[in-house]
Image (cartoon, grey):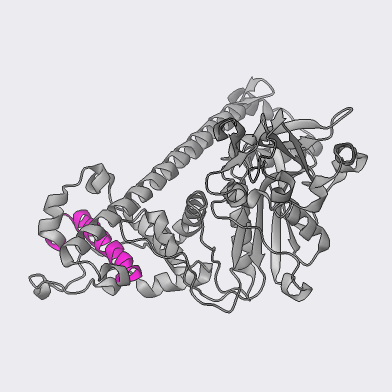
Amino acid sequence: MATDGEWTCNANSAIHITIVQPGEKKPKTLSTFHPQFTYPIFGDEESIFGYKGLIIRLRLAAHDLRPHIHISYDDRFKTVEDTKALDLLGTLKPWISEEAFGDLPEFEKAIQDENAKDFKPPGKCVHSYSTRGRNYEIWAGSLSDPEVRRLLDRVQICTPLFIEAGMPLVTDDPEWTLERWMVYFIHSSHSHRVAVLYCWIRHHLPVLALPERIAEANREKRSFPTARKEAFATTLPAPDRAVPDSPPSPSSGHGTHLYTTIHSACFNDPTIIELTVEDPNEAFDGLRDSSDYYILRPEFIKHKVNINPDPYEAHTLNQRPRLVPTAALIPTKLLHDIRMSYKIAPTQFAHILEMFLLSQIPFEQRRVGGAKMARLLIKKHKLDDANDRRYYWWRMLTKQRLYKRSKDMLIELDMTDRLQKLEETVDNVEDGYEILLKGFAAREEILKSREEELTVSQDKGAGYLNGTPAKEQRSKRKFTVEDDEDEDAGEGSATKRSKV
């Protein structure tokens, strides 16, 4: 009998996800890519036995996400006793909507439908924006709407394929439970299609202030013992779940627009107390950190939030502190009010605050910038430079938060190991913040250069009017009477230019 290796293929490579849209005579392909994960469907090995030259082609209509599965192979293993080829249809059916298994001609006919170009997502348009020369809209609809539910069911196959440990939502619950959820879609109005970019579900009832999962420790790459991935008890469903950014359009800013739109909706909804995210993955953490940083940074700057380098009274400087003087280091009441105002979860707010406070310390006085850590550990809060003291207290505040969150695990270690683990973890956290801050700085430089280019362009435009130097034009105007109609046109043009 042939070896198993001859008949075994990698499931990630075998699955081809294709986005198609109407063509002149038949549907044309916009993009093709492979999934990142298939172990929820095909097991931990992510392998399929029993086929040679296997291709599982999952087609998704670009405008309404209608799916179609087509399976082809060169050869199939003939059953020998209990050994047989994997039943592909039986394996895939629990994960993909039933309509995906229809005839290919019927699918292609639906794609070529003349109404495809006029498709709009169900619900209502809540935001629009432009990026890379294309226009996009964000639509929101209730999960109780059958059209919203159908669109969601079609795209949910992307959840296990692109989100680690992701599972599709159950959408056949009673209608009164479905009414509690809002679904957000991004629609490309440029090409009259639903872009397979993001789909976000938001709980529509008041959201209690819930602690985020212990498992979020993974984002900090901490060296502590692994915590169980279990949520704290609550009477409400998980507030948010997301379907991922698909490979055709990563790093296009769609996630940021979607996140800020949903945050704005929550901010303006008096029934919502807090926006939380259930067990986010690392990629989403970066997106959320970036978005929340730009939301909160102006507020921190406005209130001049910073670390007080001298929290102790003069007569207590020689005493060894037993507790971190948090209230004397940062304005805790003000920060609590800001957090509640912007409805950001406590742990997430702490991350953004720590990142901002770190950014207020000069780079060369931070560990990554070459700060003398040995001197920091010896002199502690008695360092001569105020920013050195701020950096010392920044690390102490971060360690305090990490210790509180993982106290039950840390107390099982002896003191030496406990301090070492905390030191390693705060270094990892700081490294993550430094990467984000570097990205923020690069982004600001790009925006600044664009503004300067725009200013130069406008100055050049102001220097010449109708091909004549402005100075010469101003001289001529002393002897020229322009009619009102021309003046109004010029003002309108200037107004539009200043809004670019």
Residue 462 lies, in percent from the top left, at 60, 30
Q: Nearer the viewer, residue 235 or 40?
A: 40
In the rendered view, tell whether residue 472 sits above or below residue 204. above
Q: Which residues are magenta?
A: 381-407
Residue at the extreme front: 81
The answer, for residue 483, to whether it is visible in the render is yes
Does the magenta run of residues contain 148? no
Q: Residue at x 9, y 73 (%)?
A: 319
Residue at the extreme right: 114
Q: Is residue 455 left or right of residue 435?
A: right
Q: How would you classify the magenta stretch by its main secondary structure?
A: helix
Q: Residue at x 41, y 56 (%)?
A: 218
Residue 225 lies, in percent from the top left, at 33, 61
Q: Residue at x 21, y 74 (%)?
A: 323
Residue 447 lies, in percent from the top left, at 50, 39
What is the quadrant of the N terminus in the image? top right
Which quadrant would residue 48 be assigned to in this image?
A: top right
Q: Is residue 485 left or right of residue 346?
A: right
What is the quadrant of the C terminus in the image? top right
Residue at the extreme bottom: 235
